[in-house]
Image (cartoon, rainbow, N blue to C red):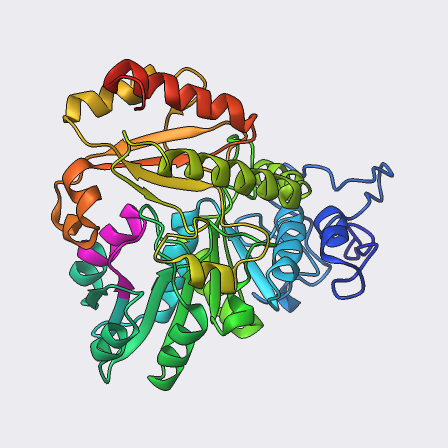
């Protein structure tokens, strides 16, 4: 028995074609069996072993063995994502949180110290606020990540990790990735950057010195609200440690079908992110000029305190998320959200349709937010691909129902 060649090599190698061409062709392999020009969904959990299976080791991805560790669809997606983020390798997971946990699990050991942005995705905040300290004895300082002096002051001899988002979820503050990389590396620490809000071609953290880039593939990469996944991208040695540790032994693997769906979504990502950003810019400008709105956060606005930092780092827009606050009573804001007709009240982002989520901060981390968000709650608008005029009209109509017409 011999090991079967499962597919022909990619038609193109990264670096030999433009980014937009790699978005279309990267990671895809024609199928030897049928001649299909797209890699088919391989719904198998196990693959035929070579004649002498004892010759395999954990790093042998040429011969597929078991889908939890490496399957045909996962491998193609990993190859594509690594090149898109200018990394050497990638590992994909079942969710974004599985990818984040895998990176932290690999980097940190009991007693290590981590510096984490004090505004970050709520599940990451919870991971560092309770689970990692309680289970592994990790010591954590939550710091305003945009205050570089505060970050430097938080560094300890045992600091092993600095973690941030490019654009923070949900208040949209913007990190200086190159400066944070300098601080981390001077301390002998690893900089991990969640770039879910800013996928390629908007931004590539590895180009600015980050050690690992992480994505919730559920969001912009998938783009259709119908698949879940996560990814870690970086140097080959780092990704191999994450794969053979957290992925192989803890699990968290992505399904072949979700990997195939996300692979399909990546093809149109450059076009979609351009539309997301353009729509978000138009909506942010409308909200900023409306007297019924107490506060708008969007780094694409010239008056936003993070505009200069975003402009220096991002390419082709400021992303598809706008956060804002409306004065008045909590019940009024609930009514506003529920009166929207085109926009859907739901979590997540990066979908083809616009989603809105309202949160009234009462927990411990509320002190990290600016006063308008602490006082009035935060409405996060994940802008979709609809006509911007329709979205603006929907917002205006709901505002008028609750607060009356703009003066």
Name the residue: 48% across, 38% down: 280
Q: Measuring from the top left, give residue 219's x and y in whole percent.
A: 49, 41
Judge whether residue 229 is colored magenta.
no
The one of 398 and 193 positioned closer to us in this rendering: 398
Q: Work out whether residue 34 can be spotted.
A: yes
Q: Work out whether residue 243 can be spotted.
A: no
Judge whether residue 118 is colored magenta.
yes
Q: Measuring from the top left, give residue 358's x and y in whole percent.
A: 27, 31
Name the residue: 34% across, 32% down: 290
The one of 103 and 297 positioned closer to us in this rendering: 297
Q: Measuring from the top left, give residue 77's x and y in whole percent.
A: 63, 50
Q: Is residue 373 left or right of residue 75?
A: left
> How many numbered callouts?
0
Q: Is residue 17 left or right of residue 302?
A: right
In the depicted structure, whether residue 384 falls above or below residue 89: above
Name the residue: 45% across, 73% down: 178
Q: Quadrant of residue 393?
A: top left
In the depicted structure, whether residue 211 falls above or below residue 65: below
Q: Quadrant of the C terminus?
A: top left
In the depicted structure, whether residue 73 falls above or below residue 293: below
Q: Which residues are magenta?
A: 116-130
Prevalent SS, magenta region: helix
Name the residue: 37% across, 86% down: 186
Q: Is residue 95 left or right of residue 360?
A: right
Q: Quadrant of the N terminus?
A: bottom right
């Amino acid at each position: 028995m011999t090991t079967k060649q499962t597919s022909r090599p990619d038609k193109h190698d990264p670096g030999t074609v433009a980014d937009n061409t790699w978005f279309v062709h990267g990671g895809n392999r024609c199928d030897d069996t049928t001649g299909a020009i797209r890699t088919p969904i391989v719904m198998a959990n196990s693959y035929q072993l070579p004649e002498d299976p004892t010759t395999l080791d954990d790093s042998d991805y040429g011969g597929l063995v078991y889908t939890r560790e490496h399957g045909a669809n996962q491998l193609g997606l990993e190859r594509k994502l690594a090149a898109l983020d200018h990394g050497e390798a990638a590992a994909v997971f079942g969710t974004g949180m599985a990818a984040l946990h895998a990176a932290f699990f690999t980097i940190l050991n009991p007693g290590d110290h981590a510096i984490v942005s004090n505004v970050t995705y709520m599940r990451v905040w919870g991971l560092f606020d309770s689970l990692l300290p309680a289970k592994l004895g990790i010591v954590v300082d939550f710091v305003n990540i945009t205050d570089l002096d505060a970050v430097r002051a938080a560094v300890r001899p045992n600091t092993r990790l600095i973690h941030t988002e490019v654009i923070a979820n949900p208040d949209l503050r913007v990190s200086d990735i190159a400066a944070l990389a300098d601080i981390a590396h001077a301390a002998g620490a690893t900089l991990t950057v969640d770039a879910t809000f800013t996928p390629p071609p908007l931004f590539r953290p590895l180009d600015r010195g980050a050690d690992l880039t992480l994505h919730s593939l559920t969001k912009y990469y998938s783009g259709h609200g119908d698949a879940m996944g996560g990814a870690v991208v970086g140097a080959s040695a780092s990704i191999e440690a994450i794969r053979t540790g957290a992925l192989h032994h803890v699990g968290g693997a992505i399904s072949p079908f979700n990997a195939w769906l996300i692979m399909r979504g990546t093809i149109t990502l450059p076009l979609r992110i351009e539309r997301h950003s353009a729509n978000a810019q138009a909506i942010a400008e409308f909200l900023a000029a409306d007297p019924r709105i107490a506060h708008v956060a969007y780094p694409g606005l010239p008056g936003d305190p993070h505009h200069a930092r975003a402009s220096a780092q991002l390419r082709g827009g400021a992303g598809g998320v706008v956060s804002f606050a409306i004065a008045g009573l909590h019940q009024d804001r609930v009514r506003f959200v529920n009166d929207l007709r085109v926009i859907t009240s739901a979590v997540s982002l990066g979908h083809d349709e616009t989603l809105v989520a309202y949160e009234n901060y009462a927990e411990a981390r509320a002190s990290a937010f600016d006063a308008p968000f602490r006082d009035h709650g935060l409405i996060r608008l994940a802008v979709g691909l609809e006509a911007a005029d329709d979205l603006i009209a929907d917002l205006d109509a709901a505002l008028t129902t609750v607060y009356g017409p703009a003066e």
